[in-house]
Image (cartoon, rainbow, N blue to C red):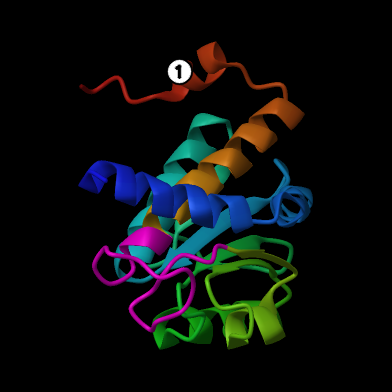
Amino acid sequence: MALIEQVMHEVDEVMSLVDESQIDDAEKVIQKDQRIFVLGAGRSGLMAKGFAMRLMHIGYTVFVIGETITPSIQAGDVLVSVSGSGKTGMVVEPTEKAKTNGVKVVAITSNSESPLVAKLGDAVIVVPGATKAGDGVQSIQLLSTLFDQSVHITLDVLCLKLSRRDHISNETAKATHSNME
């Protein structure tokens, strides 16, 4: 089997294990009249930033935790926290703080037993791709690559569901795409 086929087989396996009803639960938490914040460390953070960008394209007010222009998070806001292990301090600790301040949390992790899931998620999406901690479907790929790839797809599916719910067309989304290229 060619390497590309092996990688695609791994992604297909993980995506077949993602429970679409969990994506539906996250969709219910994320509403247009709320501010959405995203949080993640390392490559999980990059997946979260990609999600934030797509949310902006479909008309959401969205911020990335840690950026210099990100305002304070408040009760009534939504925080989408991404951590493969669900234990990363740079993700779990700010999520705990947000939760105590009345923020709704969408937790995305490979580890269904993690603190991110057990204590913090109002909605939880388990993406069981391999992580550097050894969670999830095992992979020939390095570290948490399989988790990251699968989270990207999962969050794009969530955006597609949101755009359909909110009646946002591709043309509408395209109008918000960068014109500085």
Residue 146 located left or right of residue 16? left
Q: Nearer the viewer, residue 86 or 6?
A: 6
141 part of magenta stretch: yes
Give me the residue at 42% from left, 62% from top.
147
Magenta segment's dominant SS is loop
- Quarter of the picture holding the C terminus: top left
Relative height, residue 118 to residue 125 (above, below): below
Per the image, the residue denoted by label 1 is 174
> How far from the left and from the top, in percent, is residue 77?
67, 61
Q: Quarter of the image holding residue 103?
A: bottom right
Residue 68 visible from this viewpoint: no
Q: Amino acid at mark 1?
A: Lys
Q: Which residues are magenta?
A: 127-147
Give me the residue at 72% from left, 21% from top.
167
> How far from the left and from the top, in percent, is residue 86?
51, 80
Residue 98 located left or right of residue 5? right
> How far from the left and from the top, in percent, is residue 112?
63, 78
Relative height, residue 12 to residue 115 (above, below): above
Q: Nearer the viewer, residue 79 or 28?
A: 28
Residue positioned most to the top: 171
56 part of magenta stretch: no
Q: Nearer the viewer, residue 11 or 2?
A: 2
User: Mark 1 falls on what kind of element?
Assistant: helix
